[in-house]
Image (cartoon, rainbow, N blue to C red):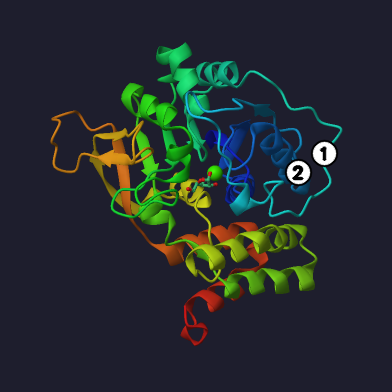
Amino acid sequence: MKNIIIDCDPGIDDSLALIMALKSPEINVVGITIVSGNVHASKGAKNALKVLRLLDMLHIPVYVGEGKPLVREFVTAEDTHGEDGLGETFIEEVYDVEVKNGVVDFILESAKRYENLTVVAIGPLTNLALTIEKDRETFNKLKEVILMGGAFKSHGNCSPVAEFNFWVDPHGADYVFKNIDIPLIMVGLDVTREIVLTPNYIELLNQIYLESRDEIAKFIVDITRFYVDFHWKQERTLGCVINDPLAIGYLLDSSICSGEDYFVQVVKNGEAIGQSMVDVADFYREKPNCHVLTKVDAKRFMVMFLTRLFPNYKKEIEVVLNNNRYGI
Ligand code: RIB
Ligand code: CA
């Protein structure tokens, strides 16, 4: 059993990662911690509860963390994820479950309580930086941190060089990279950009819903509509890049990606703010602090993702994926 805490900013792709983790029997989600990123942490916490209600798992605790980055002014991604953070679906809130405070203490207590505990961080790294700052020794009892963020050879999505999670809180990100003593895996844009929920997959989800009335299928179709429109307007992508679920995919089967160990730091000011600076030629002669993923088997991931959510449709999923008639 893989015990994990998911630190996230739900967020459309965060919600897909939460669903994938919660639908995976090998994973025990001991808690969900929320950070400001796509939307303010207060909204993100409400969205996490909506996902837990969808899966009838409201027993899993949700902790609301930092409302703003360590230093920078907080800038949301509501243009991409919608004002509500779930593609402007404005789904009814969950009123009968309270979110908790005390993210830092929850992560530290959990690090002491669980033998092997992974933190999957798929939002800005503010919460993790504050946790290390409070008690670095206890934080390093964690097994590992798998994070979605950064870009190595791929271009950024907030500037030519900066990826959103690091751009929102570069001080938090750099602090984590500089003060972590356990395995840190960077699931960056180099690999997540390969993971595109295309119109074919979305139509498959639509058909799954029409036939089986599976509310998860409908939820994904509904919340990704806004995101698909953004991708077309912003970058002429047909469909939407779903970054965060790949961090869960890597947790489940690390052979789905490959990468190298490098010393990485995050640029904290100037034009390149938020850039993950990967010391590929060992210029600084620093010990590598991160395993940077550079390749992914995107098809294998998509089969893993979709079959975990819709196990009764494994055959159909593989037909859509492997039948070149669909031009995939
Ligand atoms: O750059 C993509 C990342 O930023 C994803 O985690 C997305 O949810 C946003 O948090
Ligand atoms: Ca995210």
Side (left or right) of 147 relative to 227: left
Depth check: give the residue in front, 26 or 107: 107
List the residue tagged with mark 1: 94
Q: Residue 221, how many percent across, how many down?
A: 69, 64
Q: Which residue, given by chain and number where applicable, does mark 2 sit on? A: 50
- Name the element at disc 1: loop
Q: Is residue 20 above or below residue 186?
A: below
Eyeballing the image, is 142 above or below 124? above
> Residue at 44% across / 39% down in the picture?
167
**Residue 29 occupies quadrant:** top right
Horizontal arrangement in the rendering, residue 244 relative to residue 11 (left or right) = left
Secondary structure beneath label 2: helix
Up-down relation of residue 172 to residue 132 (above or below): below
In this rendering, position of residue 178 left or right of residue 67 = left
- In this rendering, does residue 178 appear at all? yes
The answer to whether mark 2 and mark 1 are in CB contact below 8 A is yes
Q: Position of residue 100 (x, y in %)?
A: 71, 23
Which label number is shown at residue 273?
none
Counting residues from the start of the chain, the first of labels 2 and 1 encountered is 2
Q: Can you give x and y, in whole percent of width and height, for residue 219 in the image? A: 73, 57
Tell me which corner region of the image, top left, top right, bottom left or bottom right, holds residue 199.
bottom right
Q: Is residue 169 left or right of residue 59?
A: left
Q: Is residue 63 above or below residue 278?
A: above
Name the one closer to the observer, 202 or 61. 202
Q: Residue at x 71, y 71 (%)?
A: 206
Which amino acid type corresponds to the residue marked 1 in the rendered image?
A: Val
Other-residue count near label 2 (Cα within 10 Å), few / some / many at <14 / 14–19 / ≥20: many
Amino acid tagged 2: Lys
3D distance between C-alphas at marks 2 and 1: 6 Å
